[in-house]
């Protein structure tokens, strides 16, 4: 159950997979994303509500052929330049996109976690998202006749999340802003969780989400594995690193240098605080 | 015209803050909306109930978050709920009084674009996308937009409707099943635009001190109607400015 | 916000209302149910997933003209005799029933809390519930063509729940088995919460659900207000009282004596432990 | 036949417990199923992952709960989730290996009635109703039923189908879109019934020691087929009996 990160990625993530690395600003599985880049995975369909700089990096490294998302940006800073470059110039490879709203994506995961083929919501009506995404349809309420938006369930081949702790059996505990992680894990065929630490007993914490070991395939211990995002109770968000990414991501050359440095560094676990 | 002791961004923020009433529930976007909501909370609206889409309900951050999910938002919230809950149980259920949005482009009918500039399939500029905005614009009782004025941003017709304002005019929101009132005010660094009650077209109803209506018309990409009853924004007070500056770190 | 129970019931519950007193074995708002009996409310549509002895009492007292539910029994003991008597002999008044499964009821509350007109689930298929309940229909998935069950949203006029604590502003905190209470409160037009105690600050507790004051209309302080069910961290379930109810509820006469004793006791709050 | 040192309820419970394999996830109904699951957990299946519909996942109560929501279930669970989650995220999603149900009536095709005896609109006996059973019977990978044998309980056709077993025979579950295998075993105080692989009709495949097949046929309301390969339940061990008795409080 508990294995080094490179082994976990090798076992669970394959070329062509649909992969969700989830985390809503908090607990973003950055180290796992970097390992995916290092292993040179290709043709991934990347899924995430809020693709931020680690997705910019995955896209810039050529790992992805498709992105399914609802908001792609560098939070509080601006745009993702590798993402832009892929969409507008197909560099380094063409990137197909499927675009939703947050409410739509969240409900797609909920449907996926629930074993339902689709979800309904009040959403999308009147927007140009509808005409540009065949995965936004409508259903009619059989009681009131109202028309509602329908989106298909999202069931990634593999979901990757970062959490504060796991126990030795692989039960996982996270808290703070817990976002969509529970649903993303439950919706997936396979789940990889990187954690700050492994403990003997998961003492209950207010606001916790517990992912029972039976829905987790592999746990890897990666202290600092969410940096430059943060792990509530462990370290803070490195806002400066997010700002600094803007310059790195902005041109292909500086990104190339960043990428070379990453792939030249064989990593089983990453030191705390390393994010870029 | 005296020399103002405030910037155009500052009066924009203060004006937006004044639009929020005490005890309202407010769905807060990051950036300008977040600054304005936090100014309101620290001045005339101590009971403002701020919701961020990361699931933090009733949060009162002691400094401005950079992202919608900074730790400070969770630490100070009444409660933190999972993302599906904030969208389904709070936003979709119609529990939010005001949605506070930014935009890259807005048009004559207050439709909002945060997706692409140019053609969707082959965009000139790729923007971050929808996020929570389409449903914020649909389901909040009302929407306030805050953005800087320019003729590139204020256009006759947005390149992409990410979030519906007043569609193509009267009756469109009802036809689309959108339950909130939609944008009731657009606050910029030059003034305030509001939809005409009949045509639903944005008209200039206020200017900030020292700003001429013609300058606003020039910074607007359609033939902007100016209200016969044009207001001038009251100057920011010292108290308001000091709160804005303490939050934004400006001297 | 914080008012005596009799006043809260008088303000929020009216003849003919649809009323949900929720609580899944834990934190059942028994004292509030007794106050509804005392005030002689009539023609209520009572809603609850698991109507147990307090619903037996409300039905026996003639408060209800309809019951919407998924499992009506005395948990671990047997049947509800007042409920049976109402269904089979219309005593003391006829009782219409609308019957669902737990999954259906839970999703009806979820839809109600979500502002949706209906919910979808994999359920009911092949059961005789379908033919006996017009509120069980089907929808077809617009992506896969699969047929799923649909149930209408449940939006009570008033929901009543019991919680461990509230603060002076009316924010409510409950923990332990939290059941369907959050959804039941969010689905309702009005909400009444009885609590064990009011505190200055709601210190976070693992597993807590917090109901923000803005979705709560009235809080009443009723220590022991969930007995003979229990309040996690305050008192245990009085299993003996559940067993003892069987004899009381079994015939109209012994029930009548119980009812007279209840209505003869003017109560603003009930002493801890009082349940029957 | 020697005098047994166990009761028919005890061998029923032990036999049901033996049907559960270690590390299975098991959706546990209150009463006989709960007793049996807890016996399994304390004997051969220490890794049995018990789920009660109150939302307690992976619970290991140190005594038998009277209700499906006793505090002891929450105290000892891996995690407690809200009721919609246990039904949607765990049961409906197909994560539960075995659903463990009781019944008031069961028929030849293992359809279950816990709703009414007699006519629905004008019932002779009103029973508690469905609870979680219809979806447990639909979505668990397999279902085990535990109930006492009598010709009033084992009927040709249930008065009301609360939960679908094998419908009216082969192919019915597939036609109805039910994804689990349905009832694979019915364990009573007399023996064990299992659906015929072809006809899906319940046949007697085992009897408890000292029970004759004819006695079971007599206690069954349809013409019960007896397997040519009738097993006799191995006697409860001392260890099993002592666990059953410690749980039920019997001497």
Image (cartoon, coloured by chain):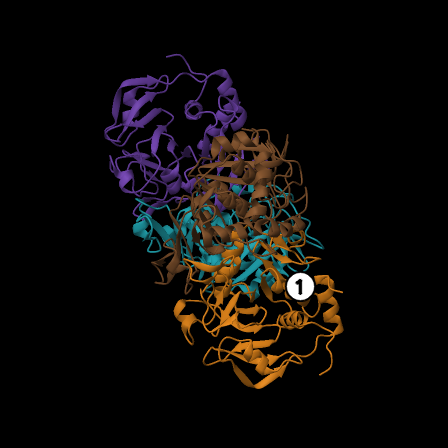
Chain colours: A brown, B orange, C cyan, D purple
Q: Chain of mark 1?
A: B
Residue B75: percent from the left, percent from the top? 67, 51
Q: Is residue A169 left or right of residue A67?
A: right
Residue occupying the far front of the picture = A253
Above or below B63: residue D21: above
Residue C200: percent from the left, percent from the top? 72, 55
Above or below D235: residue C177: below
Q: Which residue is located at x 53 percent, y 41 percent?
A: D69
Camera-side residue of D222 and B61: B61
Camera-side residue of D196 and A209: A209
Residue D70 in view, yes or no = no
Q: Is residue B176 left or right of residue C127?
A: right
Q: Is residue C122 left or right of residue C24?
A: left
Residue B1: percent from the left, percent from the top? 71, 83
**For residue C26, what is the image quadrant?**
top right
Residue B146: percent from the left, percent from the top? 58, 68
Camera-side residue of C275 and B116: B116
Residue B144 in view, yes or no = yes
Quadrant in the picture for the N terminus of chain C: bottom right
Q: Which residue is mark 1?
A: B38
Mark 1 surroundings: few (<14), some (14-19) or many (≥20) residues within 10 A = many
**For residue D150, what is the image quadrant?**
top left
Above or below B89: residue D246: above
Q: Element under label 1?
A: helix
Q: Which residue is located at x 59 percent, y 29 percent?
A: A168
Residue occupying the far bottom of the picture = B228
Camera-side residue of B149 and D1: B149
């Amino acid at each position: 159950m508990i294995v080094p990160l490179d082994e976990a990625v090798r076992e669970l993530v394959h070329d062509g997979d649909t992969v969700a690395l989830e985390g809503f600003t908090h607990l973003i599985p950055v180290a796992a994303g970097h390992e995916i880049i290092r292993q040179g995975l290709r043709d991934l369909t990347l899924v995430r509500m809020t693709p931020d700089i680690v997705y910019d990096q995955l896209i810039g490294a050529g790992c992805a052929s498709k992105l399914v998302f609802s908001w792609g940006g560098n939070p509080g800073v601006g745009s993702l330049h590798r993402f832009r470059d892929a969409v507008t110039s197909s560099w380094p490879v063409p990137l197909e996109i499927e675009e939703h709203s947050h409410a739509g994506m969240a409900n797609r995961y909920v449907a996926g976690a629930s074993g339902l083929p689709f979800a309904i919501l009040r959403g999308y009506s009147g927007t140009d998202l509808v005409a540009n995404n065949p995965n936004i349809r409508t259903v009619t309420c059989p009681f009131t006749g109202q028309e509602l938006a329908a989106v298909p369930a999202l069931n990634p081949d593999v979901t990757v999340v970062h959490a504060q702790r796991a126990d030795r059996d692989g039960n996982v505990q996270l808290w703070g802003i817990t976002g969509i992680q529970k649903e993303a894990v439950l919706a997936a065929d396979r789940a990889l969780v990187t954690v700050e630490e492994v403990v003997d007993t998961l003492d209950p914490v207010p606001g916790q989400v517990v992912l029972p070991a039976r829905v987790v395939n592999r746990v890897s211990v990666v202290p600092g594995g969410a940096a430059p995002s943060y792990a509530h109770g462990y370290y803070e968000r490195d806002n400066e690193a997010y700002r600094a990414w803007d310059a790195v991501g902005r041109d292909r050359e500086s990104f190339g240098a960043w990428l070379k440095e990453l792939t030249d560094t064989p990593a089983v676990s990453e030191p705390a605080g390393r994010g870029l | 015209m005296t020399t103002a002791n405030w910037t155009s961004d500052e009066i924009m923020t203060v004006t937006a803050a004044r639009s929020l009433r005490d005890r309202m529930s407010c769905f807060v976007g990051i950036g300008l909306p977040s600054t304005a909501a936090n100014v309101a909370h620290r001045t005339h609206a101590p009971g403002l109930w701020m919701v961020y889409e990361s699931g933090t309900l009733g949060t009162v951050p002691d400094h401005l978050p950079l992202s919608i999910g900074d730790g400070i938002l969770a630490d100070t919230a009444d409660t933190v709920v999972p993302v599906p809950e904030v969208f389904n149980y709070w936003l979709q259920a119609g529990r939010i009084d005001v949605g506070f949005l930014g935009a890259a482009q807005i048009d004559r009918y207050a439709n909002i674009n945060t997706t692409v500039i140019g053609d969707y399939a082959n965009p000139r500029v790729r923007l971050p996308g929808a996020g929570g905005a389409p449903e914020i614009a649909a389901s909040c009782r009302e929407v306030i937009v805050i953005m800087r004025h320019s003729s590139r941003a204020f256009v006759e017709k947005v390149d992409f409707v990410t979030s519906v304002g007043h569609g193509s005019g009267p009756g469109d929101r009802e036809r689309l099943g959108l339950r909130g009132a939609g944008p009731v005010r657009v606050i910029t660094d030059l003034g305030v635009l509001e939809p005409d009650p009949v045509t639903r077209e944005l008209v200039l109803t206020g200017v900030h001190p020292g700003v001429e209506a013609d300058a606003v018309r020039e910074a607007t990409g359609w033939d902007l109607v100016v209200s016969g009853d044009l207001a001038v924004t009251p100057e920011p007070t010292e108290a308001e400015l000091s709160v804005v500056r303490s939050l934004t770190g400006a001297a």
